[in-house]
Image: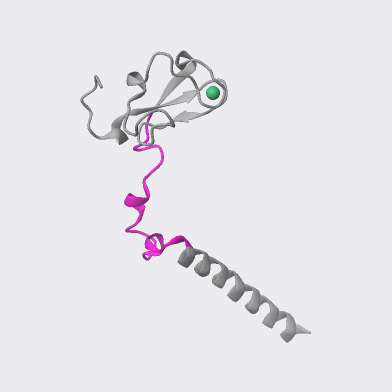
């Protein structure tokens, strides 16, 4: 480790210009510990998808600001973003079913 940045979300992400694979410092990679900056990767590191050398990668900036974290959105949307995926699905399909029921009631009324 040469960098002193402790928050991996501040580290630049790097995209493989050959295949589009994105190295996420927050996630690391199979042989790389999470939180490892791209600059700290071993020289022999290659793209895990297409085996391009690290010189084929270009910086696409830190994740912050590009993809707003769920944490920042969690306070909005009537708390919907705080629901777990199952509850969210139930809400979405419940709403779809309700819409369908309304549609069918109109259909039956007009016929
Ligand atoms: Zn690649």
Residue displayed at 37% across by 50% down: 70
Residue drawn 44% across the image and 32% down it: 30
103, 34: nearer the viewer: 34
- Above or below, 74 relative to 25: below
Residue 108 at what x, y percent from top left? 74, 84
Residue 51 is one of the magenta-drawn residues: no
Query: Which corner quadrant of the image does residue 67 belong to?
Result: top left
The residue located at (38%, 36%) in the rendering is 27
Range shown magenta: 61-85
**Which corner quadrant of the figure contains ligand 1?**
top right
- 59 lies left or right of 19: left
**Quadrant of the image containing the N terminus:** top left
Magenta stretch: includes residue 66: yes
Query: What is the quadrant of the C terminus in the image?
Result: bottom right
Residue 36 percent across, percent down from the top left: 32, 28
* Residue 79 lies in quadrant: bottom left
The answer to whether 21 appears left or right of 104 in the picture is left
């Amino acid at each position: 480790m040469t960098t002193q940045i402790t928050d991996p979300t501040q580290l630049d992400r790097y995209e493989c210009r050959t295949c589009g694979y994105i190295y996420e410092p927050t996630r690391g990679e199979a042989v790389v510990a999470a939180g490892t900056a791209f600059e700290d990767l071993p020289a022999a590191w290659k793209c895990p998808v297409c085996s391009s050398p690290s010189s084929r990668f270009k910086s696409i900036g830190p994740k912050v600001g590009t993809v707003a974290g769920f944490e920042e959105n969690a306070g909005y949307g009537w708390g919907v973003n705080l629901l777990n995926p199952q509850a969210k699905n139930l809400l979405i399909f419940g709403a779809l079913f309700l819409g369908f029921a309304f549609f069918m009631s109109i259909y039956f009324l007009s016929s």
